[in-house]
Amino acid sequence: MKSIRETEEKVQKPGPKSNKILINKDLLPSKGKYYKTDLFARKLSAIEMKELSKVTRESVDRVFNSTIASAIDGIELSDVQRNDKLWLIYYLRSITYNDIPMKVEGECKSCKKKAWYDYRLMNLDVVYAEKELEKELVLPNGDTLELRFPTIGDEIEIARTKNNPAYIENIDTDVMTVASHISSINGEAVSIYEAYTYFARGKGSALDYAKLVSHLKKFAFGARPYAKFPCSCGEYAEAEVPLTTAFFLPEI
């Protein structure tokens, strides 16, 4: 594997991007398949790192989104792939601290050996978008869906919909997230909420929903808060890399 320093390059042109880093889009879980422009990043400030170190379950999306919107250039926040979001947070931490290692304890699932490892960005567990999404899916009920991958903008819309007092129903976030992959049903464009109600109380059955989930799994991509390291037995040890205060404000 190449280190982060080998796979990113500084932009040398003068102007507003001169102090920013050109992101190698092949490193993204999406491999940059859904971005038509170059993406740039900058190192985070002390205040931004402090904010990240204090995130809670309630504030995590707001803080992560604010950080990405401020530190990533070349694209609007709403157009960033949702499944690239977590990787970008790990990436920003990495370039800010020049990819200094962080000690994490891992265990090999094969031989059960435990050891301490030096985590760097290249160790992050990432599933890459190797195959192009098959955008058309015919459900068991005969309906045809046109599919896409959701963005952070869609994620924000889901949160806004769920918190909208006009909707008195209890919205299932997981089902709505799956439904956000649908752009049209039988050629008719649908909103995320309309796609959700198609399964919640419409024509879409549990069988149709399971078919959609199974189809999307074949093309899934994203990062997990875990790292993998070669084990002496020939297999790999896995260690959690939690987004804690120690991660964002490490001892140096």
Image: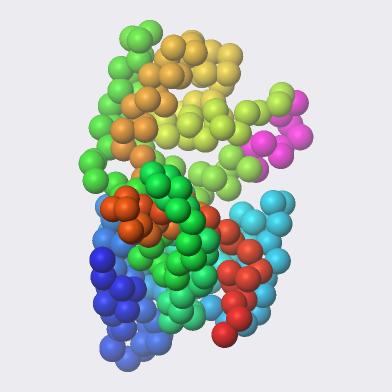
Could you tell me residue 182's position as x and y percent? Answer: 41, 31
The one of 74 and 65 positioned closer to us in this rendering: 65
Query: Does 169 sit left or right of 132 as displayed?
Result: right
Q: Please tell me in which quadrant of the rendered image residue 120 appears.
A: bottom left
- Tell me the quarter of the image containing the C terminus: bottom right
Work out whether 222 lies above or below 102: above
Q: Please tell me in which quadrant of the rendered image residue 15 appears.
A: bottom left
Q: Residue at x 46, y 75 (%)?
A: 101
Residue 65 can be seen, yes or no: no
How many marks are shown on the rendered structure?
Answer: 0
- 205 within the magenta span: no
Q: Residue at x 45, y 19 (%)?
A: 209
Query: Does 159 sit left or right of 129 as displayed?
Result: right
Work out whether 205 lies above or below 49: above
Could you tell me residue 5's position as x and y percent? Answer: 32, 79
Magenta region, residue range: 160-168
Work out whether 56 lies above or below 196: below
Q: Residue furthest bottom?
A: 14
Could you tell me residue 140's position as x and y percent? Answer: 35, 10
Could you tell me residue 194's position as x and y percent? Answer: 53, 26
Residue 109 can be seen, yes or no: yes
Judged by its main secondary structure, the magenta piece is loop
